[in-house]
Image (spheres, rainbow, N blue to C red):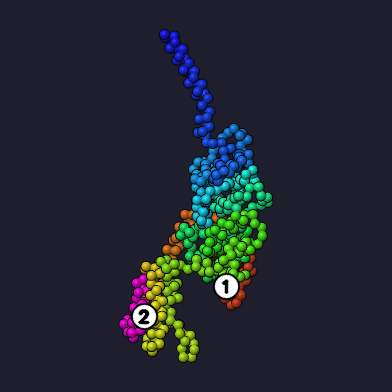
Amino acid sequence: MSFFVCVNLVRRSLACILWFVCILPEIQGQSEGPSLEDVPQPGVAGQAPAPSIAAELSEEGDSRKPATRTESESRQFVVYGADFSTRVALASLAEDTRVALMQTIGKEDEQWEHSIVIQLREEEGPIKTAYFEVPGGYRIQIEISLARGKPVGLEGALLELLLIEYGLRDRAGEAVESVGVPLWLVEGMRESFRWGEGVREYGMYQALFDKNELYPVEKIMRVQRLEGMDPISKAAFQASSGALVISLLEQDGGQESMRTMLGELSTFEGDQVALVRKHFPGMNLGPESLSKWWALQLAQMAEKPFPYVLTINETERRLQELLEVRFNDSSGSLIAIGASDFRDLLALPIRERETRILPLAERVRQFYYRAFPAHRPVVREYLLILGEIVADKDERLAERLHDLQSERNRLAALGNRTRDYLEWYRITSSEELTGGFDSFVEIKNRLEAMSGKNEGPIGVYMDSMQRLFSEQARPQSP
């Protein structure tokens, strides 16, 4: 009996050993992650999966060695290379961009057709994108260098690939010579994302409006790259592109029209203005209609909504514009009376005084809720003073006006300090170098290239003083 027991134990031990030897390689392979050959299947039911991209992306030489990979939530993005946390961050960024695009064009539940592969490299180099026609569709890929951290322009590159993928849907077997998306559409979409999220730069739009730095529609569509632009021109182009895209989306049926245009735009090589008018017929009312819609949208984006409370500096600038009474005297000359001189309005006849002051008081009253909270007592006091002037009262008006101006000066200084501190904090806490210093270097070189010759009597005096101090500073010979 003991002999048979020993034989059974030996048989069971051998069986366990054989099972362990056979299953161990499979367990190890799973721990390292799926092979690079395993490209996710497209999200459209009934479509054949895209072929493997291992030969183009792995560059490892040994196809038996599994590669690490991370998929995004929708599985449209597959990220290779780097460490796990970096892959997850890139996959999340790409997925957020996809969701924002689908929400913007009104197709949140739409399934994708072509997967997009993101290959992370440690070697330094620019962002590279490519697409390949394969049986059953296309494959799209992007290579990103992490040698200097997150590369500039990454979000735009990912959005461009998403727009290309959208334009290549249902086009398997077509002869597509080249693909691409115009820069104005990429930057305009990104601006519309920020606008939809509530990140609205009213101040920037207003400043660009005031300086007349915004791009006309035809010029927007001719821009092909941001490199070489100074910061102001770049901001103007991005803001102008955003206004154009938002104006298109806000037309009747704008989202549907945008989807149909995106289906054609990635392979379109003709006149872009004609293509926009084709898909947005509601704007095609005349040769200048597109520019008119665009200009109207820009004006709306520059206008701050009613609940928007102005900053200290914005409030002060607006008060300087509001608190001024203008009228023509008997000779036709223009008279302008500022806030500090409101007491002089008592010299006007009562009827004329009311005519000049009451409209001003109404404008100031409407401005009250837009003013910075610390300015509201000041605005309230100005309203009381204007009411007393209309009622022909003069109770310490000069002293009260002086005190109000002193308080405004104090608030203005506080606003400047706050602005300077916030700018300092933003610069010192920045984790990304934009490289946007070309304009400053250009100004420096232009100043250095000037002759330096001072004209006029002051210039002659300054030159003589410069020579005098230079001679005094020169060491004396023994």
Residue 222 visible to the viewer: no
Q: Position of residue 177 (x, y in %)?
A: 68, 51
For the record, the magenta segment spans 375-399
Frontmost residue, 243 versus 421: 243
Quarter of the image for residue 156 reads bottom right
Frontmost residue, 22 versus 240: 22
* Image quadrant occupied by the C terminus: bottom right
Residue 414 shows which numbered tag? none
**Residue 89 counted in the magenta span:** no
Which residue is located at x 36 percent, y 77 percent?
383
Numbered disc in front, either 2 or 1: 2
Mark 1 secondary-structure assignment: helix
Residue 328 visible to the viewer: yes
Which residue is the extreme one toward the bottom? 330
Q: Position of residue 386 (x, y in %)?
A: 36, 80
Q: Amino acid type of disc 1?
A: Met
Q: Position of residue 166 (x, y in %)?
A: 58, 52
Q: Residues within 10 Å of mark 2 (few under 14, many from 20)?
A: many
Does 205 sit above or below residue 42? Answer: below
Q: Amino acid type of disc 2?
A: Leu
* Residue ID for mark 1: 462
Does 341 sit above or below residue 196? Answer: below
Task: Label the magenta part by its dominant secondary structure.
Answer: helix
Mark 2 secondary-structure assignment: helix
* Residue ID for mark 2: 386
**Residue 394 counted in the magenta span:** yes
